[in-house]
Image: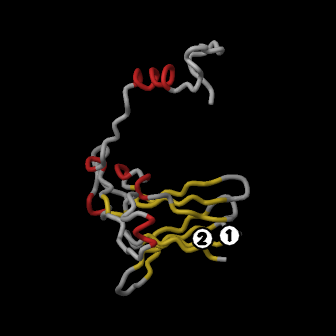
Amino acid sequence: MVIPLYDDDTGLLVLAGTGDSAVDCFEVSTSEPFLSQVSHCLTDMSTRGVAMVPKLALDVLSCEVMQVLQLTDNCIVPISYQVPRKHTGQEFHDDLYPDTVGTTPAMSAEEWWKGGNKQVEKVSLNPDKQPKLKAPPAKQVAAKLISGGSKEDPARGSTSSSPLSTP
């Protein structure tokens, strides 16, 4: 059985056959030639399944445009597709990465059940345009775990020698 994986953003099509050790990558075009082979990867083990890694997990500073995980009998093998570029160090290439589907839902489940139909917003893969996650200071996390994170009766005190409680 052939397993197709298609990336609509880049037009790349990966074909892998169960029981086969080859994984092929093609570029799909609207003009001739409609399919152009980009890569023919021979692996050491037979394929049982393949999956595409989410775009937001790619190493875009190394020009990685796709990553596929090959499931074999014994392990999972990552197969990376990179575009060779001459560059100094790590830099982002806008021409390789069109905006892609983000992870924020376009609507709630209730809106969908009422018949709503919206497209998920697209996001840039440029690391400089990614939102920076704010982590709470470690002291606040530790204080919460020690004081507010316990369900024990404060009048009785803790019977544990650890300042952290278990659920």
Q: Could you tell me residue 27's position as x and y percent?
A: 42, 74
- Quadrant housing the N terminus: bottom right
Going by the picture, which residue comes out furthest to the bottom? 32
Q: Amino acid at mark 2?
A: Ala
Where is mark 2, residue-wise?
Answer: 16
Residue ID at (42%, 74%): 114
Residue nearest the viewer, comparing 103 with 165: 165
Q: Is residue 45 left or right of residue 91?
A: right
Q: Is residue 153 left or right of residue 32?
A: right
Q: Could you tell me residue 161's position as x and y percent?
A: 63, 12
Q: Amino acid at mark 1?
A: Asp
Quarter of image, res 124:
bottom left
Residue ID at (56%, 16%): 163
Q: Could you tell me if the residues under marks 2 and 1 are in contact, i.e. CB atoms within 8 Å? A: yes
Residue at disc 2, secondary structure: strand
Q: Is residue 41 left or right of residue 100?
A: right
Residue nearest the viewer, comparing 33 with 156: 156
Where is mark 1, residue-wise?
Answer: 20
